[in-house]
Amino acid sequence: MMMMMEYLSVTLLLKICLSIGLVGVLSLFVHLYNVLWLKPERRRWKIQRQGIGGPPPSFLYGNIPEMKKIQQQQQQSKAMAAAKNHNNKVDLSSSSSSSSSSISHTDWPSILFPYLEEWRNKYGQMFMYSTGNIQFLYMNNPDVVKEISLCTALELGKPSYLAKERKPLFGDGILVSSGKVWAHQRKSIAPELYLNKVKGMIKLMVESTESLLRAWESSIEGNGGISNIRVDEHFRSVAADIISRACFGSNYSKGEEIFLKLRDLQRAISQRSLLIGVPGVRFIPSKNNREIWRLEKEIRSLILNVVKERREAGYEKDLLQMILESAASNNNQELDENQFIVDNCKNIYFAGHETSATTASWCLMLLALYPEWQDRARAEVVDVYNGHHRPDADMLRKLKTLTMVIQETMRLYPPAAFVSREPSRDMKFGEVDVPEGVNIWIPVSTFHHDPEIWGHDAHMFNPERFAKGIFGACKFPHAYMPFGMGTRTCVGQNFAMIELKVLLSLVLLKFSFSISPNYHHSPAFRLVIEPGNGMELFIRRVD
């Protein structure tokens, strides 16, 4: 009898465990079905009923297979065209006008993102598509974009996938955070990058640039008066040195080591950009993911070592000190103090050097292609500096032509290809209802190259269009967004503009430049738009 009872008890226990297991499996299945299909499908339906179309997605991958297919077709077409002619390689034997016309400044968006171009032609100014279970609403309507730019609600933030997919590079820092976390970070960081504070950094910007000038002078002397230089690498080093000095003060040499590893991390993360939204991809121990995890760990360790040295050494008035004080005053218990410091150091470092370095490279390319503008900008610098070689804030303010050149460069080659937003609740912009969780994808390059906005010469390099400022340059001023838009406009734009003026003015004062025959025009998307094969120029001393 006792054995029978024990048997029944064990049987009952097994049935209970089996039932619990089945309930667990069923619950997991329901959860996955909801996350991977039901919720995205519901969001798509809310958009579709407004008359907004888009390519039909597949399960798990969304439109990724079609995106890859369109990219492959585009690459094949490009390869066939390249076999017939070599227009992408500049011929220095031609005149300046013909060499400048051999490079198109408006084709690169359709080359880098051919699927968006194809869908825009098929579905119109607004359409939806998906990568994995992430839903995107492509928004190319100026009126709706203006509504978005005017929205100040904290519920309209950065896409949540950025904090997940690019967490190793950005963490939960100011570039990708949203809501109250972002508001606290901006309140702490933005005042340190106001114009009056940035003016105090001009000296360190000049000192960093002078090391570049000496290196170029030495290279030119060693090569008979002209040197073939890959300027993007040099600009990246100078920009890293500047942000290292500004952010880490006396520890700037450690900052340079952090920069090199961040650059490697940026390359590694950009390799999986098309797989964003596919469940589990970032957790697979692939070679690329293992490299990302290693770099993330090393960068964190380096930053925390600098922080430890700072705390032991005492107070320094720089961006790092501001981040330390902000972390100490943070009342949000969800944020770990060390993680707050690490994330925002990485964010400031990435934004602080990448935008300036790539824009400076594109600037020099355009001035090399259009020597009349190079001469005009140089004449202005010579006149304003009047024999001085260390500019101050007042001198930089007077560089109107150079400012126009920088603004036109960022129109043709904006650092960021897209402005992205995600509402944490259902929101309405104009006549468009945007469901919670849908990513609004605003194509900066498309707006910057639109003849309806910029006129018939939108495809041309014409800094003169900015002679009366941004409001006089185009039909819709809000369509010009090299530093983002609305409340999320880059807090470092004053820093970037001052840095660019210092760097470019001192280069113009000492050197002239032309396109190297080694240069192949191939813009690439690596989280920012940069020269895919580097920026090689011939550099000479100016008499």
Image (spheres, grey):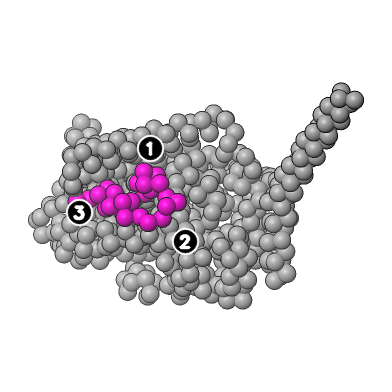
The span picked out in magenta is: 317-344
Pointer 2 local density, CA inside 10 Å: few below 14, some 14–19, many at least 20: some
**Count of marks, rendered view:** 3
Q: CA distance from mark 2 to mark 3?
A: 30 Å
Q: Mark 3 vs mark 1: give the one in front.
A: 1
Q: Give the amino acid at mark 2.
A: Gly
Q: CA distance from mark 2 to mark 1?
A: 24 Å
Does the segment drawn in magenta span residue 24?
no
Helix, strand or loop for disc 2: helix
The residue at 51%/50% (across/down) is 162
Which of the marked residues, 3 or 1, is nearer the chain's N terminus?
Answer: 3
Residue that label 1 marks? 300
Which of the marked residues, 2 or 1, is nearer the chain's N terminus?
Answer: 2
Contact, CB < 8 Å: mark 2 with mark 3?
A: no
Q: Mark 2 vs mark 3: give the one in front.
A: 2
Q: CA distance from mark 3 to mark 1?
A: 26 Å
The residue at 50%/42% (across/down) is 270
In the displayed structure image, the side of residue 458 where residue 27 appears, left or right = right
Q: Position of residue 304 (x, y in %)?
A: 32, 38
Q: Residue furthest left?
A: 387
Q: Give the amino acid at mark 1.
A: Arg
The residue at 32%/74% (across/down) is 468
Residue that label 3 marks? 201
| Camera-side residue of 65 and 386 | 65
Residue 240 found in image quarter: top left
Q: Position of residue 194 (x, y in %)?
A: 26, 62
| Camera-side residue of 70 and 35 | 35
Q: Position of residue 158 (x, y in %)?
A: 50, 58
Q: Quadrant of the N terminus?
A: top right
Pointer 3 local density, CA inside 10 Å: few below 14, some 14–19, many at least 20: many
